Amino acid sequence: MKADDPGILWIEEPQLGLSGRMYLPIYMHGLTTTFRHMKNSLLGKAVTVSYPDEEPHIDNPAIYRGTHRLNRDSQGRVKCVACFLCATACPAHCIDIVAAESPWPDREKYPQSFCIDELRCIFCGMCEEACPVDAIELTSLYNLTGRSREEMIFDKEKLLSVYDQTHEREPMRSPEMGGTV
Amino acid sequence: MLLALIKIAILLGGLMTAAAYFVLLERRMAAWIQDRIGPNRVGIPLTNIRIFGLGQPLADGLKFILKEEFTPSHVDRALFVAAPIVILVAALSLFAVIPVGSFLPSKVAGHPLSDGPIEMTVAPGVDAALIYVFALSSIAVYGVILGGWASNNKYSFLGGLRSSAQLVAYEVPMGLGILGAVLAAGSLNLSEIIAAQADRGWFALLQPLGFVVFSVAAFAEAARLPFDLPECEQELVGGYHTEYSGMKLLLFLVAEFLHMITAAFLMVILFLGGWHFPGLTGSSMALDGWGHPGELWLWGQALVRAGVLLGKVFCIIVFFMLVRWTWPRFRYDQLMSLAWKVMLPLGLINFVVSACLEQLQGTLGYAWLRWVAIALAWIVLFGAWIGVSLLGSVTENRPRRPAQPLESDLRA
């Protein structure tokens, strides 16, 4: 493309007003913004926290994307129907499901094994979006640590235990909240 | 002799500590302005006591000292080592003539300390003090250029060149700003300039235009934002100290902070009345103990004066730091046009106007003329400022020629 191409739209920079040309009035305005932020931080309204001493405040745990959990139904069975939608949706390929014929009459399949490699996971929440029965959910547990790679591959029992640990604080997504089951 | 050595020891210790803690303050302020908490965890080593992170400077210093000091193979070794030394020596020796208060009484608890009152300057009574300050602050630029040149690296070299051009450009308006104050005080001795202000009113009030010109130039001389072009990270990596590490880098960084402290001291001493504060410090140059003869009163007055001066300097430095996180950096051509097209004429106007007003007051000598002179000075400030901004020599951003097609486009 040449400089005189008719397709180029040349835009004139807008002229500054008098206060802009005088620099200081506008700069003073900026200075008040900085000062306000400094004042608020000094009054204890800083956004960050001193982490190990102080836990961060999570505004809405329902939309936080932390560690996964596998939900249980009302009879305490795993809710998952082994449809593989989460594993398909996962961009990091971190979900591994082995399906088997269900021992229960209300569904055909259930996951014999359900493993998530938390080290590969990018916490995008696609699995949660894809799940047709709201079986997999991301909790607000953010401090996910382990001493080995093996430990960070969460199997079905571990994921169900995350549910047991969190379901009181973070209820399962109900039909009122847009859930399916 | 002993007295001078004691003064030097106190000054050096004080300056180094101040520079270290100003780094901490700057980091904390940066954090507060960005809604963070900032470094607050380092306290007393080997304990769990965290005194608001006041141990941080110690940790920073240790880190710099213990880090590997790498000298790249492509540098000019002698100059590479000399540059940080030059810049730090210049930045420190500049403080020899800068007063940190007025006088200390000559006696403590009846024991004489010296023959007369002790001036709170390492080298008292230097009549060319301002010239000395000027000369040494120019040598600091030399250190920057040496560092850029010796690094043998295009980014460092560009940083060095930029800073040389910038500092040469801003020495001129800075000198013009100072000239007004020198003219009004009739001396180049910093203590006498303060005394003149205690007597006649602060020069920031009497010559507001000079104060503005000097402050802008002081920001540029200290290479602080919005004028920190020599080390503009986005364009030049680290600027002139890209190739430096460890202790040498520390020397550069300390020298930069010392420049800021110097600029704050000069602003306070030349324009904001030094140790003088109306109704608090007394206004005669010698200590009078607020009219009480006792030695305790004299010491009290001496300490209040030092406190006032250092308090003002502290406020100016906090302002420097606030400005750093507020105002964006100038583009290089804007920086240059601000120096040559705006600050230089403003400095000249201030010089001419304050010379005329001085002469007028000196000749006629009416008391009411003083207030007229102040009013006139402020009118000149606003008039000149608005005039310069209407000319738009810095904000005018459009190309001076219409865009020409490239030669390669013409051939195609």
Image (tube, grey):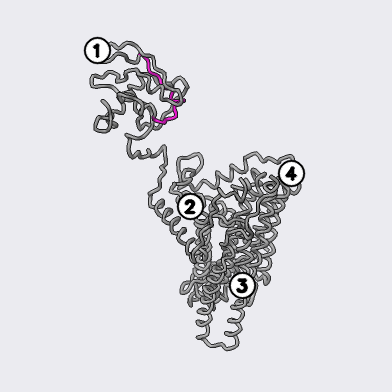
Local SS, label 1: loop
Mark 3 and 4 residues: CB-CB less than 8 Å, in contact? no
* Chain holding disc 3: B
Mark 2, other Cα within 10 Å: few <14 / some 14–19 / many ≥20: many
Of all residues shown, which one is farthest toward the front?
Answer: A6
Residue at x 47% of width, y 74% of height: B278
Residue behind mark 1: A105
Relative vertical location of residue A112 with respect to residue B376 in this rendering, above or below? above
Q: In this view, does B148 lie to the left or right of B331?
A: right
Amino acid identity at mark 2: Met
Disc ID at residue B116: 3
> Is residue A120 highlighted in magenta?
yes
Q: In which quarter of the image is the C terminus of chain B?
A: top right
Number of the front mark, 1 or 3: 1
What residue is at 58 percent from the left and 63 percent from the top? Answer: B394
Name the spot of residue B246 as percent of width and height, x first. Answer: 64, 43
SS for dot 3: loop
- Tell me where the magenta segment starts and ends, as one range: A112-125
With B381 as the anchor, is B79 left or right in this view?
right
Q: Provide the residue designation for mark 4.
A: B75
- Callouts 1 and 3 on one subunit: no
Q: Residue at x 61, y 58 (%)?
A: B399
Name the one closer to the observer, B358 or B113.
B358
Mark 2–mark 1 distance (CA, rounded to whole Å): 65 Å
Q: Mark 2 points at which residue?
A: B29
Mark 3 vs 4, N-terminal side: 4
Q: In this picture, is A62 found above or below B114?
A: above
Residue A34 visible in the current orientation: yes
Mark 1 and mark 3 residues within 8 Å of each other at the beta carbon: no
Chain letter of the residue carrying label 4: B
